[in-house]
Structure formats: structure tokens, C-alpha cells
Image (cartoon, helix red, strand yellow):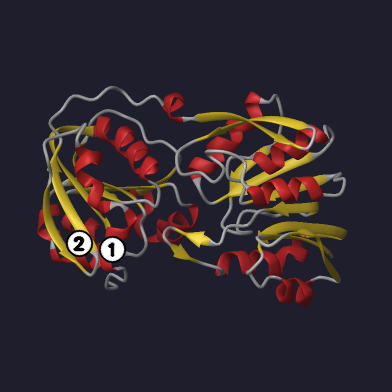
């Protein structure tokens, strides 16, 4: 059995007597293999993740014990919940509201995470569900809080958690639906605005990679009714947001999970993206660099990749190495829009 890698999991390992014999539900910002050890300690284990990359990495070991989705339902059946704090406080609130109806009265509530990630707000996060939690451990800038689930909760209503706003991209108006923590949940970001303003006409089949709330693919589908749009992301909350954004605007598109190109088996005339470069609280480039380097394999002859990126990111050398031609078609001090032709 591999040792925990993250500081949070190492802290949990020191306190794992708390999980022995529990019917345990684990969710949140999972980073390593530690849940596999919890499977040996707990009476029963369910790991719920909204991260398709993590799901794929653990599915062989955990089997049916790990679930990937935007929502988990059912009758109360757990007597302990371990939430690993996600980056966004709103996402933590969403997960708690969804998970607590699945807990039996008197269940243990555990919150663990890095101090810079909001774990010290555990008192407020758990206030709707029980009395003030105690801090069980604190080390290496991480903390573990322990409370008890002893307040009544209402059934989880997914629709209540969507934000809704109107955005304007050139002459295209779009209604955006987004769940907590999803990119573009609060408004259209400046980078995506620049991308949509500078895109040349698109036809045929289009891939919106890292779709977030579905803004790029939906705007382009609205501009080009004949466009066949596919949207992919690793985040289940993003995928459901994209489905809702398409639906509320009366648009059609295919939306599914993919860890970079893991679940993509076709080619496209266009790939368009505002690619992510953060994973949780950390800056993470590997997935985006793989996305750029392998993009020509998923483009038709003379197909094009168009991305927007922070100006400081060194994507030009990667694009130059894998595409016949790359040019910057828009930019300012913060962002650049690259157009690369296969």
C-alpha cells in the first residue's frame, strides 16, 4: 500500500482511528491514494468525486466504491462524512448540502484541508449541520476538524445551486447556468471575451476543451446553427453546467467527461479553448501542455486550434513544435489568442 503523498492525507493517517468501523463517505479535493487505506479501516467506504482524472486513477483499485458525478442521492446510509476542502468555499457548501441528507443523525462530520484553502472557516461551514466542531489536528499548514451531524436538513435541490446570468459576446447574447466552483460561474472572464471576439468563422465539428459552464461552445453554436459542438471537461459540475447552458438557450451539443483526450475518438475541424492551468490550489501545466501537443491528432487536415492564454504562459514553443503555423491573432498585457493550423 502506497504511503499518503499530500500533507492533508499524512495528517489523516495520524488520525485514522477516527474512521475505523465507520460507514464512511469521502468527497472533495482528493489528491492521492489515501482513500484506499480508508477502505481497509472502514466498515464501508464510498468515495464521491467530481474530478474525472481522479476517478480514472482510482477506479481499478476502488471499483464500485468510487463514483464520479455532479450529484449523489439516496436514503441516509452513512455514519461519517470526510470532506477534503475544495478550492472554492461555495463548492464546499454545495457538497455539504448534497451529502448531509445521506447521513444518519449523529454521524461524524470531518473537514480536512490546507489552511490557505479555507479550512479555518470550518466553524461557519458546519454551523447549519451541528454544534461547533473541535480541531483534532493541525500540522504542516493543514487542519482537521471534527463535528457531529445533529441538526435537521432539507432535501438537496440541485436547481437551487445554479447561478444564472446573461453575457454578451459581440452580437451574441447568452444565458449562462453554472454550479459553484465552475469556471465562468460568476461572469464572463476577460480572456474568453477576447477569444470569442477574435475567432474566425467556424464550421463543421468543433471541440470545446475544458468547457467550464459551456460559454465558448454555446456562443459558437448560437452563432453557427449548423455547427456540431462537443464539450469536454474533467469536472462533473462543469459538465452539468454546460448541459444546462445549452438547454436554457435552446441549443444542441454533446457534453461528456474526458481526461485530456482519454474519451475522444474522433477528429474536428476546430478545437477552441480557454485551457485551465490550475489544479486546486496549485499551478499545474502538464494537462494543458499535453492537450496542445496532441491536438493535431484530433484535427482534420487543415483543421485549426484556437486558444486564449495568460500572456506569461510559454505556449508558443509548444504550438510551434506541433503545428505547421501559429500566429497571435489578438492580445494585450494580460492575454494572447493563438491560432494554430494543423
The residue tagged 2 is 12
Q: Quadrant of the C terminus?
A: bottom right
Residue furthest to the front: 333
Q: Is residue 156 above or below residue 216?
A: above
Label tally: 2
Rendered location of residue 53, percent (x, y): 49, 57
Q: Secondary structure at mark 1?
A: helix
x%, y% of residue 177?
Answer: 56, 31
Q: Which residue is mark 1?
A: 34
Q: Nearer the viewer, residue 312 or 213?
A: 312
Image position of 54 (left or right of 26)? right
Whether residue 30 is situated above or below residue 246 in the rendered picture: below
Q: Nearer the viewer, mark 2 or mark 1?
A: 2
Say which quadrant the N terminus sits in.
bottom left
Q: Is residue 73 left or right of residue 312?
A: left
Indicate the position of residue 297 as horizontal and vertical percent values: 76, 64
Give the residue displayed 27% in from the left and 22% down from the top: 154
Q: Is residue 24 visible?
A: no
Tell me, yes or no, if residue 192 can be seen here.
yes
Q: Residues within 10 Å of mark 2 (few under 14, many from 20)?
A: many
Residue located at (58% from left, 45% from top): 212
Give left or right: position of 94 versus 259.
left
Using the rendered view, name the quadrant where residue 69 is placed: top left
Of mark 2 and mark 1, the one earlier in the sequence is 2
User: What residue is drawn where x is 28% and y is 63%?
Assistant: 34
Q: Position of residue 98 (x, y in %)?
A: 33, 34
Residues at badges 2 and 1 in contact (C-beta under 8 Å)? yes
Amino acid at each position: 500500500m502506497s504511503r499518503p503523498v499530500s500533507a492533508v492525507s499524512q495528517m489523516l493517517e495520524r488520525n485514522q482511528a477516527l474512521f475505523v468501523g465507520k460507514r464512511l463517505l469521502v468527497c472533495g479535493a482528493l489528491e492521492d491514494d489515501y482513500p484506499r487505506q480508508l477502505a481497509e479501516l472502514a466498515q464501508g467506504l464510498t468515495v464521491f468525486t467530481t474530478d474525472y482524472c481522479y476517478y480514472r486513477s482510482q477506479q481499478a483499485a476502488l471499483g464500485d466504491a468510487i463514483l464520479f458525478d455532479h450529484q449523489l442521492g439516496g436514503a441516509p446510509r452513512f455514519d461519517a462524512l470526510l470532506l477534503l476542502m475544495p478550492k472554492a468555499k461555495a463548492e464546499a457548501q454545495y457538497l455539504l448540502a448534497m451529502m448531509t441528507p445521506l447521513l444518519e443523525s449523529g454521524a461524524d462530520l470531518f473537514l480536512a484541508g490546507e489552511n490557505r484553502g479555507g479550512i479555518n472557516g470550518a466553524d461557519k461551514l458546519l454551523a447549519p449541520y451541528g454544534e461547533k466542531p473541535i480541531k483534532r489536528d493541525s500540522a504542516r499548514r493543514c487542519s482537521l476538524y471534527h463535528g457531529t451531524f445533529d441538526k435537521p436538513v432539507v432535501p438537496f435541490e440541485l436547481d437551487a445551486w445554479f447561478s444564472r446570468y446573461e453575457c454578451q459576446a459581440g452580437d451574441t447574447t447568452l444565458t449562462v447556468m453554472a454550479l459553484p466552483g465552475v469556471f465562468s460561474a460568476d461572469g464572463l472572464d476577460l480572456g474568453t471575451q477576447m477569444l470569442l471576439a477574435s475567432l474566425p468563422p467556424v464550421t463543421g465539428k468543433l471541440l470545446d476543451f475544458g468547457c467550464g459552464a459551456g460559454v465558448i461552445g454555446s456562443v459558437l453554436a448560437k452563432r453557427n446553427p449548423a455547427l456540431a459542438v462537443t464539450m469536454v471537461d474533467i469536472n462533473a459540475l462543469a459538465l452539468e453546467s454546460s448541459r444546462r447552458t445549452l438547454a436554457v438557450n435552446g441549443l444542441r451539443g454533446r457534453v461528456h467527461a474526458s481526461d485530456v483526450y482519454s474519451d475522444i475518438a474522433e477528429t474536428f475541424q476546430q478545437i477552441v479553448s480557454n485551457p485551465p492551468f490550475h489544479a486546486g490550489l496549485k499551478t499545474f501545466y502538464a494537462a494543458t501542455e499535453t492537450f496542445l501537443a496532441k491536438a493535431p491528432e484530433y484535427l482534420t487536415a487543415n483543421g485549426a486550434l484556437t486558444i486564449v492564454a495568460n500572456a506569461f504562459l510559454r505556449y508558443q514553443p509548444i504550438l510551434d513544435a506541433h503545428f505547421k503555423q501559429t500566429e497571435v491573432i489578438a492580445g494585450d498585457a494580460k492575454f494572447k489568442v493563438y491560432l494554430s493550423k494543423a
